[in-house]
Amino acid sequence: MSVTVSPPPTSDGEPITVVPETAEESVPDEGSVVAPPLDRWSAPAEVAPLRWADVRNAATNMSRFLGMRLAGWVLLGTGSALLIAGLLLSWLELRVAGVSAIALALVAMLFTLGRPSLSVTMKVAERHVHVGQRATGDLVVRNAGGRRTMPGRIELPIGDQTASIGLPSLSATGEFEQSFVIPTDRRSVVEVGPALSVQGDPFGLTGRESLWTEEIEVFVHPRTVNLPGRQTGFVHDLEGHATQKLSNSDMSFHALREYVPGDDRRHIHWRSSARTGDLMVRQFEETRQSRIAIAIDLSDQSYGGDDEFEDAVSVAASFVQQAFREENPVAVATNLEVHRGLSATRAMNELSRVERLDRTHVTELFRLVRDREATASITVIVTGSRVRTERLRRAATLLGVDTRVILIRVDPHHRLAVETVSNVTAIQLPALEELPRAVRRSNA
């Protein structure tokens, strides 16, 4: 059933046919117009608002594609503004200045066309040096093309600084070599490179960079001092470090006791058995190899300054150096991890990387050494002046009684002090140069 409504007529003069509300939705009359259900209407997609980060990324990509620097964009924008102002104001001087600025920017872009045909080699003689040791490198640039190259510039990052090296025009077989100095005034890992050439105009309006070499790491090892030979206590005897645990079979003799069934007959002491009338067997102390655990506290709240922390790293490095000299197994520990099976060079490299941390504590260092280096016969803990000796002694109880513990507090404001109680030796160290004397006093 349909209802015919006269007004308003359509453009063709025919009435509009609609479906009344009582009509069945499933069977509409022929020629009727049915509105779609509300749930079938789809809202238009929302347009994401333009963000400043998107504009900045687009501008950066455009600048990289065209090789245009900020100064070039400023000149191009200024020239366009002057040209428009000159046209609007009918001012000839402004039009000439605008056209000249735009032309200069376009000519500067010609310097960035193409890629130079170069072969760049970076050589660093020593990649592992000590603080204060001279370290240099060489940068060799060859013309790999068949035509003379244009003058340019090579930028070489060296640590926190960048060396700008002027590159002259090279003939078809030309070569250019430049030496550079690597700073070694403090312990660090100096990243050298990658070397990159910069194509651009003499005014610095444009520039395009091309990478030529890989990055090289130069390790500047901390300062060290030589500790007294084998008097440091690192090697107690040829068999190893004797513990308080008793064993039925080992190298370190302890006492005699009566034979019990199950004892090894090879350990029967016949002379004592003949004298006492009872079988007597040897009893031994369990020994372990002199494994050294050297731990450096990285907690920022433990130190009074940068110089104090550097002295602490140098103290740890001196013990590492001495342990490798005596061919003892060494583990280097920090508040975060323990490094095992390192060579002498790799151990010093790890100490070149360490930096102070905010969210850590010296007690975490003791727990890590206890959990990861329980078999160490000697543990050296190095920390700063803000940690009290009493707290260090309480933390040392986390380690076993069979472990000799050496606690070193770097404190430049107090004199040298060495105190040994049981298996724990506490050293108050005013300077790195006092470390050999402190080690001799700890073994007296």
Image (cartoon, helix red, strand yellow):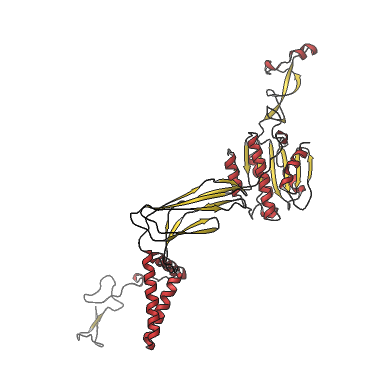
Q: Position of residue 285 (x, y in %)?
A: 72, 27
When asked about the image quadrant of residue 40, the answer is bottom left
Q: From the viewer's perspective, is 252 left or right of 155? A: right
Q: From the viewer's perspective, is 146 left or right of 434? A: left
Q: Position of residue 137 (x, y in %)?
A: 51, 50
The residue lying at 36 percent from left, 67 percent from top is 110
Q: From the viewer's perspective, is 146 left or right of 230? A: left
Q: Is residue 160 visible?
A: yes
For the residue pair 215 and 387, the one nearer the viewer reads as 215
For the residue pair 254 and 132, the one nearer the viewer reads as 132
When asked about the image quadrant of residue 205, the answer is bottom left
Above or below, 93 relative to 217: below
Q: Position of residue 410 (x, y in %)?
A: 72, 49
When asked about the image quadrant of residue 112, the answer is bottom left
Q: From the viewer's perspective, is 427 left or right of 326? A: right
Number of marks? 0
Question: Where the N terminus falls, by quadrant?
Answer: bottom left
Q: Position of residue 437 (x, y in %)?
A: 76, 41
Q: Is residue 374 visible?
A: no
The residue lying at 66 percent from left, 46 percent from top is 314
Question: Where the C terminus falls, by quadrant?
Answer: top right
Above or below, 103 relative to 396: below
